[in-house]
Amino acid sequence: MNDTVAVALITSLSTLSAAGVAGAATAWVTGRQLRHQSVLARQERAERRAADHREVCRGVYETFLSRADEAYRVLDEGWFAAPFTESGRWEAGFAARRALDEAYVRVRLAGPDDVAERGAEVVRGIGDEFRLHARLVAGGPDAAGSAAEREPSARTRALRVRADGSWEFVAAARRALTGEAADERPPAGRTASL
């Protein structure tokens, strides 16, 4: 074979081999970059979904606390009403409890279980306070003074249950939303800031 042809053949084969190696290396690097970008995109979508879920939960928890506060306001009006005979007040209590129950269903759906359990305690506490108040009013409908004046210790116990239930719910909600523990429980007689 001619030396020139052999050199040209060797040169072309080495050029083709180098191009093949370079192409394979480029394909490998590009594939690796695409896989990395795919992982980053999945992580970003997961983080976005988690952030969206936290925002939905935050709204659900805030609505629940707002409905609990509405029920507490109706209860406070009832505790200080003298006498408590107006049917509108009883209807307001029923409406407040119904709104609270609806908000609690959303808390259960949003979860997690710990928050739902604390929400159930708030709902139970409010129901118990309504029943206590109704029992006090029924027991002395013609008595002078409000239920709070006639039974101050009952109202004090009810307020303690309110504060404890709300604090526990807020603490569980904070853990669910941020992963952080709640601040220390407020001293007895002071309510947690909601």
Image (cartoon, helix red, strand yellow):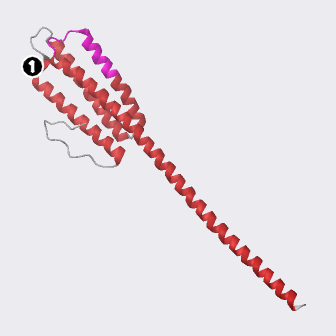
Q: Is residue 42 above or below residue 59?
A: below
Q: Residue 7: x percent and y percent?
A: 82, 88
Residue 84 appears anywhere in the view: yes
Front residue of this view, candidates 2 and 83: 2
- Looking at this view, is 185 or 31 the one in front? 31
Q: Which residue in the protein does label 1 denote?
A: 149
Mark 1 is surrounded, within 10 Å at the Cα level, by few (under 14), some (14 to 19) or many (20 or more) other residues, namely some
Q: Say if the magenta span includes residue 82.
A: yes
Question: Residue 17 is drawn in which quadrant?
Answer: bottom right
In the picture, the quarter occupied by the N terminus is bottom right
User: Residue 142: horizontal and vertical position, in percent?
Assistant: 12, 8
User: Is residue 49 magenta-colored?
Assistant: no
* Residue found 15% across the figure and 29% down from its top: 157
Which residues are drawn in magenta? Answer: 81-98
Vertical relation: 145 (above or below) 97: above
Three-letter code for the amino acid on which mark 1 is drawn: Glu
Vertically, is 119 above or below 48?
A: above
Residue 2's spot in the image, x, y percent?
90, 90
Please state if 61 lies on the left or on the right of 43 as rendered. left
